[in-house]
């Protein structure tokens, strides 16, 4: 099954930021306990409130002075078991579909 992965802990670590600094930057827009929970157990979360996510992204922008987008804290991980419909699969010569034959190539 495909999933959405929260990368908040990795983002903080990469930028040498602490959850405490993020909590200060977010202020009253989110509870400190929720931020600690997302940092520590983010990949176990099955849902996150969009206003909390927006507050975290805005707080990260304040801390870093950089434009922070949703892709900086969330990642889509596709299911890798469905080889036929997976656009990230590598070409497997044992499969029925073969590469397209482009014919003769002429350089002008």
Image (cartoon, rainbow, N blue to C red):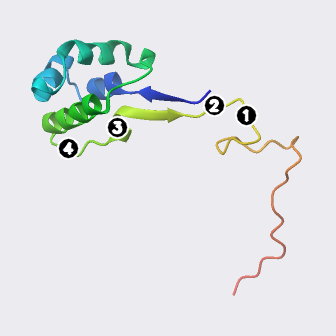
Question: Is 76 on the left-hand or right-hand side of 23?
Answer: right
Classify 10 Å Cα crowding around label 2: few (below 14), some (14-19), many (20 and above): few
Foreground disc of the pair 2, 3: 2
Q: CA distance from mark 1 to mark 4?
A: 37 Å
Q: Earlier in the sequence, mark 2 or mark 3?
A: 3
In depth, the one of 94 and 29 nearer the eye is: 29
Which residue was labeled with disc 3?
72
> Residue 33: percent from the left, percent from the top?
22, 12
Q: Earlier in the sequence, mark 1 or mark 4?
A: 4
Question: Is 45 on the left-hand or right-hand side of 63?
Answer: right
Does 107 sit above or below residue 95?
below
Which residue was labeled with disc 1?
82
Q: Earlier in the sequence, mark 2 or mark 4?
A: 4
Image quarter hosting the C terminus: bottom right
> Residue 103: percent from the left, percent from the top?
84, 73
Circle 2: element type: loop
Q: Earlier in the sequence, mark 1 or mark 3?
A: 3
Classify 10 Å Cα crowding around label 1: few (below 14), some (14-19), many (20 and above): few
Label ID, residue 66: 4
Image quarter hosting the N terminus: top right
For image coordinates 41% across by 18% down, the residue present is: 45
In depth, the one of 85 and 102 nearer the eye is: 85
Which residue was labeled with disc 2?
79
Classify 10 Å Cα crowding around label 4: few (below 14), some (14-19), many (20 and above): few
User: Is there a contact, CB below 8 Å, between mark 1 and mark 4?
Assistant: no
User: Is there a contact, CB below 8 Å, between mark 3 and mark 4?
Assistant: no
Question: Is 63 on the left-hand or right-hand side of 11?
Answer: left
User: Is there a contact, CB below 8 Å, between mark 2 and mark 3?
Assistant: no
For image coordinates 23% across by 46% down, the residue present is: 67
For image coordinates 85% across by 44% down, the residue present is: 93
Find the residue positioned furthest to the bottom. 108
User: Is there a contact, CB below 8 Å, between mark 2 and mark 1?
Assistant: yes
């Amino acid at each position: 099954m495909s999933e959405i992965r929260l990368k908040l802990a990795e983002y903080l670590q990469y930028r040498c930021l602490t959850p405490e600094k993020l909590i200060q930057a977010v202020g009253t827009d989110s509870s400190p306990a929720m931020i600690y929970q997302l940092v520590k157990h983010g990949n176990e979360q099955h849902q996150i409130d969009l206003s909390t996510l927006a507050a975290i992204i805005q707080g990260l922008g304040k801390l870093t002075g950089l434009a922070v987008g949703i892709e900086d804290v969330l990642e889509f991980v596709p299911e890798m078991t469905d080889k036929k419909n997976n656009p990230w699969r590598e070409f497997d010569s044992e499969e029925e579909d073969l590469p397209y034959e482009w014919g003769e190539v002429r350089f002008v």
